[in-house]
Image: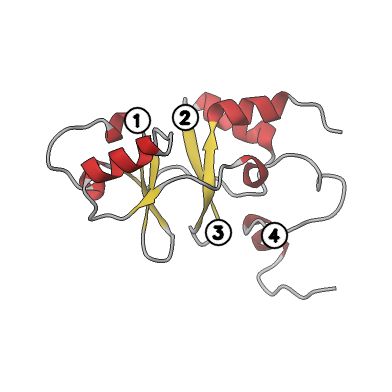
Amino acid sequence: MYDYPAGKSDWMAAGLPTEGEAAGRPTAGTVARRDVPTCHLGESLRDVRERARAAGWDACVVVNEALIVMGLLRAEQLGREGDLTAESAMRPGPSTLRPHVPIAEVAEFMTEHDLPNAPVTTSGGELIGLLIREDVERAAHERPA
């Protein structure tokens, strides 16, 4: 037994392990890709774009030194031309999801809002990974073991 002062909801929102009936079902945290590229506010968009594309990504999560999500660069923003920084090109305050959200709810949310991707964060805003819509839809339609 462990006493977690912040409570059960915060425990799950932090992506910490759970037990019970839903423990083996896919969630935002289990489907999110952890290898998503990150960048900082002052970085050159050109450098960020080259690094993201070289790694096979069409997105980059803008974070601060503590890995708190500050913004998101999707394909449209990464493709912008000119002498821009990540901060000037990013989508500030993107919709984020907590790791404990069931993947079926995530799929519905992403479809409803036409999101190609969405960051997964702790309740404190720290980046866990990035959800890709195709991964979410695949996981939502898989039958549990």
Residue depicted at x 49% and y 39%: 118
Q: Residues within 10 Å of mark 3 (few under 14, many from 20)?
A: some
Query: Disc 2 residue type?
Result: Leu
Residue depicted at x 37% and y 65%: 65
* Eye-nearest disc, 1 or 3: 1
Spatial CA distance of label 2 from label 1 is 12 Å
Spatial CA distance of label 1 from label 3 is 26 Å
In what quadrant of the picture does the N terminus appear? bottom right
**Circle on res. 115:** 2
Residue depicted at x 28% and y 34%: 77
What residue does disc 4 label? 16
Query: Disc 4 residue type?
Result: Leu
Spatial CA distance of label 1 from label 4 is 31 Å
* Quadrant of residue 95 within the rendered picture: top left
What residue does disc 1 label? 75
Residue depicted at x 48% and y 28%: 113
